[in-house]
Image (spheres, helix red, strand yellow):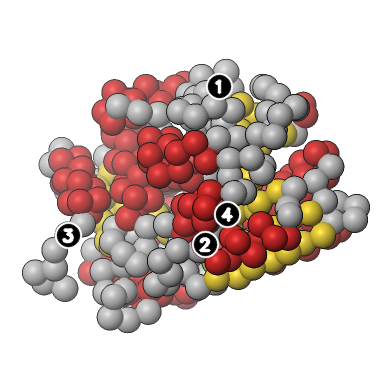
Amino acid sequence: MSGAVLTDEETRARELVATHNRDAGESALPIGVLTPLSGPGDPVAGELVVRGAVLGARYAAEHLGVEVRLLLENDQRSATVEHMSRSAVGGLAKLAFLDRVSAVVGQWHLRTAPVVAEVAEEIGLPIFVENGHNTVTRGRRQVFRTYFSIADRAPMMAAFVASRGWRRVAVLAADTVFGQMLADTLCDELASTVPGVQLHRIDFAQDGVADLDAQLGEAAQFGPDLLLNAGVVRTNYLVIDGARAAGLLPGIPMMVCFPFPMRSADYWRLAGEAGAGVVWPATRFSPSWEGLTPIGRWFVETYHRDFGSYPPDNTLNSFTDVTILAQAAKTAGTGERAALHAALTSGTFDTWRGPVSFGWSEQDGYHQPPELVLQHYRAVGDSADDAVIVWPPEAATGEYLDPRGGR
């Protein structure tokens, strides 16, 4: 792809990595960052992943005495001429066999993570994934996750729907792996949890769609109590636009299925008043959360100083994964892959939410998710730190404000 024009996100990400690596010595721990930095993937998410990895590497040098060199690959580099997964595996091969990295972080898309994880498993390369694919860690010994899966979030979302008495749920789902897995898992959970639920599911093509006005018009005719937005990347905003045009928003409660509202500046710019009242599943994390450990406080303060905002959870995830790898390498005394893996699977690691260790099961593999909550914006312009937790009840920090009035 020589001569390709870089996206703004990839340009900034590569500058961040290059700046960090100038101070990394020859013996620094090599960690690969394989993440989307151009279309058809989500380059905004990829840039945020890179920010977290860079801060993790900086923390490791300053507080753990472990130097880290980051090797960055855009897993969408050739995705415009071949399948996204082939592009991502090509990036993994370069990191594994040419750059000889000790481990990899940064896999964001459900369309690429399973095949990348399969190849990493075959070659014995530890890898951390940053997405919610239900089965990506299952049965695998080289794949780690410190984030929650779709299956983790579905019971909590369904329980909240039941608590509100919502019975008519319109589900708008993209035809990607993520969109379909979300819709399938959530519809099954709603059917088993919400008495008398009526589901009206509309699947749509993710690629090439310019608007979803017709689909949201159909949803409006259904007369939902709740709009469940399972769009992906840009189409989550097309769902909002179509719902606004159909008269559903603002007014009908909306739940989205992953934490993109936490990118608050982008969220309000693109959603506007129609985005008020949204609910989403997220890691129990906020800049003012009293549960933050010293490493978490350092992360929040440093991110705000460097980037002028508070960090979303995809940045938090990659930061966590790099700092865990640095601690494991310190314990192992080497970055050799087998020794690093042994340290990962036997150690306990300091993180923003307290100690984490990786017990293995056939069902979940090495999957250690954080505490999960439902967050809620109550007013237009709220920041991530203004969001309140509305579920589960024992963790609630504020009341849910129904956009139709009442609580």
CA gap, disc 3 to disc 4?
A: 37 Å
Q: Are marks 2 and 4 in contact (CB under 8 Å)?
A: yes
**Does residue 153 sit above or below 83 in this rendering?**
above
**Front position in the image: 72 or 204:** 204
Q: Looking at the image, is mark 3 or mark 2 earlier in the sequence?
A: 3
Q: Looking at the image, is mark 1 or mark 4 earlier in the sequence?
A: 4
Q: Are marks 3 and 2 in contact (CB under 8 Å)?
A: no
Q: Amino acid at mark 4?
A: Ala
Q: Are marks 1 and 4 in contact (CB under 8 Å)?
A: no
Circle 2 SS class: helix
| Quadrant of the image containing the C terminus | top right
Quadrant of the rendered structure where residue 207 is?
Answer: bottom left
Q: Which residue is mark 1?
A: 289
Q: Callout 3 environment at 10 Å: few (<14), some (14 to 19), or many (20+)?
A: few
Q: Amino acid at mark 2?
A: Asp
Q: Nearer the viewer, mark 3 or mark 4?
A: 4
Q: Looking at the image, is mark 1 or mark 2 earlier in the sequence?
A: 2
Q: Looking at the image, is mark 2 or mark 4 earlier in the sequence?
A: 2
Q: Which residue is mark 2?
A: 213
Residue 317 appears in the picture as rendered: no
* Residue in the image at 34% along x and 60% along y: 36
Q: Looking at the image, is mark 3 or mark 4 earlier in the sequence?
A: 3
Quadrant of the rendered structure where residue 116 is?
Answer: bottom left
Q: Amino acid at mark 3?
A: Leu
Estimate the x, y position of residue 192 in percent, counting from the top left.
86, 58
Q: Which residue is mark 4?
A: 246
CA gap, disc 3 to disc 2?
A: 32 Å
Estimate the x, y position of residue 291 in percent, counting from the top left.
58, 22
Estimate the x, y position of residue 66 in percent, counting from the top left.
31, 37
